[in-house]
Amino acid sequence: TQLLEQSPQFLSIQEGENLTVYCNSSSVFSSLQWYRQEPGEGPVLLVTVVTGGEVKKLKRLTFQFGDARKDSSLHITAAQTGDTGLYLCAGGGNNAGNMLTFGGGTRLMVKP
Amino acid sequence: GAVVSQHPSWVICKSGTSVKIECRSLDFQATTMFWYRQFPKQSLMLMATSNEGSKATYEQGVEKDKFLINHASLTLSTLTVTSAHPEDSSFYICSARENRGPFFGQGTRLTVV
């Protein structure tokens, strides 16, 4: 069974601060997804990374996939209150029949 | 934009009744869909894999007779919670993979009273 450990579980910061969320596994994943979920809604896909060492940027969010494809990180620069939410990493799901393995989630609260 | 649509968004039902939740893939065909359950402030837990035209595959500990899954077409999977009890109250989410990656429905908040 592939497991993903996400850290920290909870993060409370002031607006304007930077933060990094980590997603680690002992297993290799063919792809890894990052999602953001708001209360009462389904997870929204932010990015998919597939290549070891890959770095993707989405405005103030920077996603990195480890060289060995066992870990990933999400870095947010100058956090805003609108970034508040539950961030989930998920591995696998590289084709239609593969299920996703989810990390435990990081609950981010950005205070004004 | 949303590529997986889930309905209803929320439902309240009485104990002992059954509730059906629909999951539709928009503009793409999904031979496989996944159903998750999410408890407050926790991550998603996979319940079952829905396979078009064949039986669903259930995760360990998930009662297949209680959570009936039907994947009758390439764009629709349904989850029926039978004889619902208050402990079945939860947030249920479906997903399917589109070219850009796995997408999720909006989720269904089920409250059994």
Image (tube, grey):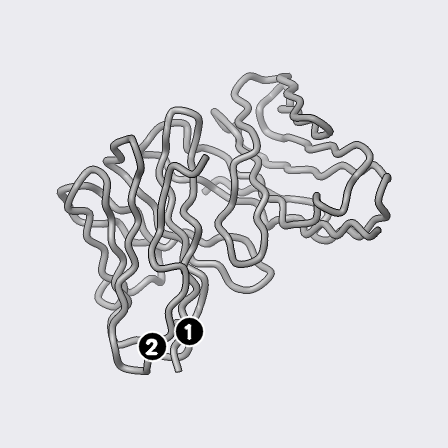
The structure residue drawn at horizontal position 27% and vertical position 58%, both measured from the top left corner, is B79
In the rendered structure, the answer to whether residue B71 lies left or right of residue A22 reads left
Quick one: label 1 or label 2, which is nearer the N terminus? 2
Above or below, comparing residue A85 to residue A40 in the picture = above
Look at the picture and state if A80 lies above or below B8. above
Q: What element carries label 2?
A: strand
Q: Name the residue under label 1.
A: B111
Q: What element carries label 1?
A: strand
User: Which quadrant of the structure image shows residue B91?
Assistant: bottom left
Other residues around mark 2 within 10 Å, as few (<14) / some (14–19) / many (≥20): some
Q: Residues within 10 Å of mark 1 (few under 14, many from 20)?
A: some
Q: Are marks 1 and 2 on the same chain?
A: yes
Query: In which image quadrant can residue A89 be found?
Result: top right
Q: Is residue A89 left or right of residue B111?
A: right
- Name the residue at 44% across, 40% down: A100
Rendered location of residue A83, percent (x, y): 70, 43
Residue nearest the viewer, comparing A29 with A79 = A79
C-alpha span from label 1 to label 2: 6 Å
In the depicted view, which residue is nearer to us: B47 or A40?
Answer: A40
Residue drawn at the location 35% of the way across and 79% of the way down: B85
Residues at marks 1 and 2 touching, judged by CB atoms closer than 8 Å? yes
- Amino acid type, label 1: Thr
In-image side of A69 versus A95 (left or right) = right
- Image coords of residue B11 (percent x, y): 37, 69
Q: Circle 2 is placed at which residue position?
A: B13
Kindly identify which chain the residue marked by label 2 belongs to: B
Residue A19 against residue B60 in the figure, above or below: above
Amino acid type, residue under disc 2 in the picture: Cys
